[in-house]
Amino acid sequence: MKKKIEQKITKDMIIDDVINLDKRLGDVFLGFGMHCIFCHLGLEETVEEAAKVHDVDCDFLVKKLNEVYNDNKK
């Protein structure tokens, strides 16, 4: 039986707050072509807002962020 993984990262979180959870999450943003982690907007922009600007599927991005975050917690 698969253990249910608690989702920690949500689309309404500020990008900088996400990165502060785990620095490796920056690589996920970079993998989507989102260089927000180097931009001043990352300090105030939500994951959802950045996804819209970069034409990225927000739900898929959040899923990948949580996969990496939860994998790092094992």
Image (tube, rainbow, N blue to C red):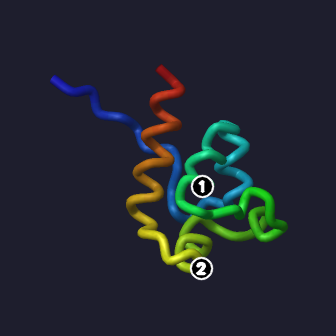
Tag 1 and tag 2, C-beta contact below 8 Å: no
Task: Give me the residue at 64% from left, 37% from top.
Answer: 24
Q: Amino acid at mark 1?
A: Phe
Residue 53 is tagged as 2
Q: Is residue 39 left or right of residue 71?
A: right
Q: Position of residue 39 (x, y in %)?
A: 80, 65
Q: Is residue 43 left or right of residue 63?
A: right
Q: Is residue 1 left or right of residue 25?
A: left
Classify the position of the N terminus by image quarter. Answer: top left
Q: Residue furthest right?
A: 40
Mark 1 and mark 2: Cα distance apart in space: 13 Å
Q: Is residue 1 left or right of residue 41?
A: left
Q: Nearer the viewer, residue 66 or 53?
A: 53
Q: Is residue 63 above or below residue 48?
A: above
Q: Position of residue 22 (x, y in %)?
A: 66, 37
Q: Position of residue 73 (x, y in %)?
A: 52, 25
Q: Position of residue 26 (x, y in %)?
A: 66, 47
Density class for disc 1 (Cα within 10 Å; few <14, some 14-19, many ≥20) is: many
Q: Amino acid at mark 2?
A: Val
Task: Give me the residue at 50% from left, 77% from top.
Answer: 55
Residue of label 1: 29
Give the structural element (helix, strand or loop) at label 1: helix
Residue 57 is tagged as none
Task: Give me the residue at 62% from left, 63% from top.
Answer: 34
Q: Is residue 29 above or below residue 36?
A: above
Q: Quadrant of residue 37?
A: bottom right
Q: Is residue 1 above or below residue 48?
A: above
Give the structural element (helix, strand or loop) at label 2: helix
